[in-house]
Amino acid sequence: VQLQASGGGLVQAGGSLRLSCAASGRTGAMGWFRQAPGKEREFVSAIIWNGGNTFYTYYSDSVKGRFTISRDNAQNTVYLQMNSLKPEDTAVYYCAAGNTGYYSGRNYRSPDLYDYWGQGTQVTVSS
């Protein structure tokens, strides 16, 4: 599976951006991670498809209430709507996908769960 992320850019604090990630195939888990300069890659959000119309979403505490993840299975695309952006959201955002459905207790926040990674898209939030 290949992933192509887009939608990054420069925005002022308080503004919004929408990231998109198109996958070449369908996977159960799709998520976003980010990496700021000098920091480790961190989990942002994930959406897990368990077949049918059931989706499970996860967010890091730092973005909960500001970011919304969604996916279009027909287009094999995941979106990350980012509102109320802060300078600390500045990072390279990576799309990830994993060959797994939903299992209670599985750690969808761990990068180890994901099998495929996109190239990253830069998000810069100015103060």
Image (tube, helix red, strand yellow):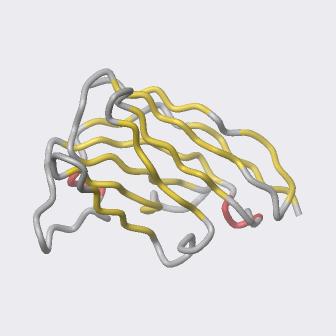
Quick check: 107 above or below 41? below
Q: Locate residue 62 relative to residue 47 in the image: left or right.
A: right
Q: Quadrant of residue 42?
A: bottom left
Residue 53 position within the rendered picture, expressed as x and y whole percent measured from the top left: 24, 50
x, y percentage for residue 93?
54, 46
In screen coordinates, is 86 left or right of 39?
Answer: right
Q: Position of residue 97 (x, y in %)?
A: 29, 41
At x 26% / y 62%, what residue is drawn? 108
> What x and y, as percent, mark residue 35?
53, 54
Q: Is residue 57 or residue 74 the one in the foreground?
A: 74
Q: What residue sits 73% from the left and 62% below the top?
A: 85
Q: Quadrant of residue 28?
A: top left
Q: Residue at x 53, y 36 (%)?
A: 20
Q: Residue furthest bottom?
A: 61
Residue occupying the far left of the picture: 103
32 sits left or right of 18 in the view: left
Q: Is residue 34 above or below residue 84?
A: above
